[in-house]
Image: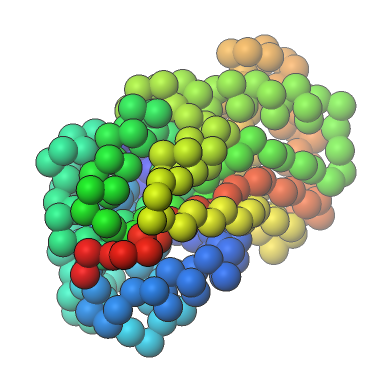
């Protein structure tokens, strides 16, 4: 899976970091020992790395996995001089071949709403076998609210949530069901699983991100709702991008083994 530009990832990173549940993040960092190996799935340019390192004084060894060589090159440019860092260009669908064997913690950001139930089942089986921790942030949960409201908001949200279940490169995507699927897969004996809300809260200071978000939502729902209907909604949203507010629901999930392998 690829298709996310450096520009889009950079545009959303501040909102992502502000949305993360700090209690779960700090719990994960407190649990991790010094010099632990962290493997980040779908790493992009390293946003998860930056979010965790900004909250920790410990040194970690990072392995970033992504299918996009340009994003990995940007991650190396930003961080190879300051952190123990490996980057591997790899297809995440090949779960059995992912280099997870020495991972104390597996991380991901804004990934699991794009993957399938089969992917979650295969990945969780590996984690449970090797007793790795798991921290996945910013999984879309299907909730969107706008201020000011528009009569088409509910229809747009419903159509968008349906679109989120299309195949995004891993089979039929979990979309808003991602956190529930992860919780079920990881809620096993000797694992503690915590889930916390981590919504985007976009206001006038996030106007550029909001505009791109609205355009992306409109593109996703046009086939379902029709171009003229969606254009009416989009015109209204863009007209209020500088003074409106938007909430996009996400959830973070942390699963820690009570008897870790390290």
| Residue 134 position (above or below residue 53) | above
Relative to the observer, which residue lies in front, 124 or 62? 124
Q: Residue at x 86, y 38 (%)?
A: 149
Q: Quadrant of residue 67?
A: top left
| Residue 92 position (above or below residue 219) | below
- Image coordinates of residue 114 in percent, x first then y, are 43, 34
Q: Quadrant of residue 220?
A: top right
Is any atom of residue 35 visible in this view? yes
- Image coordinates of residue 117 in percent, x first then y, are 40, 28
| Residue 115 position (above or below residue 212) | above
Q: Residue at x 36, y 36 (%)?
A: 120
| Residue 163 position (above or below residue 245) | above
Is any atom of residue 76 visible in this view? no
Relative to the observer, which residue lies in front, 69 or 166? 166
- Image coordinates of residue 51 in percent, x first then y, are 44, 69
- Image coordinates of residue 55 in percent, x first then y, are 46, 79
Residue at the front extreme?
Answer: 189
The scheme the figure's colours follow is: rainbow
Q: Residue at x 66, y 46 (%)?
A: 248
Relative to the observer, which residue lies in front, 15 or 96? 96
Relative to the observer, which residue lies in front, 243 or 103? 103
Q: Residue at x 71, y 40 (%)?
A: 144
Question: On the rendered structure, is 24 left or right of 242?
Answer: left
Q: Quadrant of the N terminus?
A: top left
Q: Quadrant of residue 125?
A: top left
Question: On the rendered structure, is 25 left or right of 36?
Answer: right
């Amino acid at each position: 899976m690829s298709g996310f530009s450096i520009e889009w990832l950079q545009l959303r990173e501040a909102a992502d970091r502000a949305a993360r549940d700090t209690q779960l993040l700090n719990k994960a960092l407190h649990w991790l020992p010094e010099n632990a190996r962290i493997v980040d799935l779908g790493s992009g340019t390293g946003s998860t790395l930056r979010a965790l390192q900004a909250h920790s004084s410990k040194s970690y060894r990072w392995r970033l996995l992504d299918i996009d060589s340009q994003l990995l090159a940007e991650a190396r440019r930003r961080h190879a001089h300051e952190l123990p860092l490996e980057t591997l260009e790899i297809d995440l669908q090949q779960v059995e071949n992912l280099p997870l064997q020495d991972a104390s913690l597996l991380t991901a950001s804004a990934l699991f709403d794009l993957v399938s139930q089969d992917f979650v089942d295969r990945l969780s089986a590996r984690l449970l076998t090797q007793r790795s921790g798991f921290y996945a942030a910013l999984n879309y949960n299907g909730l969107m609210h706008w201020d000011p409201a528009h009569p088409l908001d509910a229809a747009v949200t419903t159509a968008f949530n349906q679109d989120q279940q299309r195949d995004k490169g891993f089979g039929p995507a979990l979309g808003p069901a991602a956190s529930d699927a992860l919780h079920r897969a990881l809620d096993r004996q000797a694992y503690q699983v915590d889930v916390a809300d981590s919504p985007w809260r976009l206001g006038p200071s996030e106007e550029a991100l909001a505009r791109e978000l609205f355009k992306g939502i409109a593109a996703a729902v046009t086939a379902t709702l029709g171009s003229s209907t969606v254009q009416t909604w989009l015109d209204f949203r863009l007209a209020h991008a500088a003074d409106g507010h938007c909430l996009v629901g996400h959830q973070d999930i942390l699963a820690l083994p009570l008897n870790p392998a390290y």
